[in-house]
Amino acid sequence: MRNGNLLNNKGFTLLELMLVLLLCTLLVSVYIGIVSKVLEYWQEKNEEIRIHENLQYSLHFIEKNLRQLDQQQIEYFPESMQIISNNSLGQTSYMDFSGKMCYMENTYFYYHAGNRQLRINRKNEHNVVSINIDQVRIRELVPGTLVEVTLSSFDKYGKEHVLSSKIRISPRR
C-alpha cells in the first residue's frame, strides 16, 4: 500500500515546468514588443504635436505683428522678402523673411535660416521668438493686399510639417 501512494504523486514534472516557463517567456516577449511599438508611436505623435504647436505659435506671432503695422503704408518687397511699414510711433518697421541676419533697428521680426529661428530686433536685442523653423516662405497672392506665409519644419524622422496662413496686409479697397 505504501508503494501505491508513492506512484500516485500529484506534482509537476520537469517537462511541464519547462513548457510553462517557455509559454510565459513567449507571452512576455510579445507584450514587450507591443509596448515598445506603442511607445515609439506615442513619441512620434508627441513630436508631431510639438512641431505643429511651434509652427502655430510662430504663424500667430507673424500675424499679430503684421496687424500692429500701419495698414495704410504697408509694402511687401518680394525680391528682398521684406515687409516695410510704420509702427504706431511713426517709426519705419521691418519684417524680414530672407533668412539672413538682420541688423536694422526696429525690426518686428526676422527669420535667421542659419539658426532656424524667428527673432526680434527692436533695439539690437536679437531675441529668439521661435526655434526649429526650417523654412519660411512668403508669396504675394494679391499685390499689395494679400500674402501667404508658409512655415515648415522637419521632425527627427525626416517628415516635413507645413503650416500656412493667408494674411491681409492692407485694408480692403
Image (cartoon, rainbow, N blue to C red):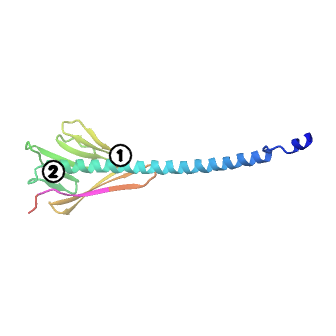
Q: Is residue 57 visible?
A: yes
Q: Residues within 10 Å of mark 2 (few under 14, many from 20)?
A: some
Q: Which residue is mark 1?
A: 132
State the CA–CA distance, disc 2 to disc 1: 24 Å
Q: Is residue 169 magenta?
A: yes
Residue 141 image position (x, y, % from top left): 21, 63
115 sits to left or right of 69: right
**Label 1 near label 2: C-beta < 8 Å?**
no
Residue type, numbered disc 2:
Arg
> Over which residues does the magenta segment extend?
163-170
Which residue corresponds to mark 2?
A: 67
Q: Main secondary structure of the magenta part?
A: strand
**Is residue 125 toward the left or the right of residue 39 in the image?**
left
Amino acid type of the residue tagged 1 in the rendering: Asn
**Toward the viewer: 36 or 87?**
36
Residue 164 is covered by the magenta coloring: yes
Question: Which of the image's four quarters has the N terminus?
Answer: top right
Q: Secondary structure at mark 2?
A: helix
Q: Position of residue 46 (x, y in %)?
A: 41, 48
Q: Where's residue 109, x and y in %?
A: 22, 45
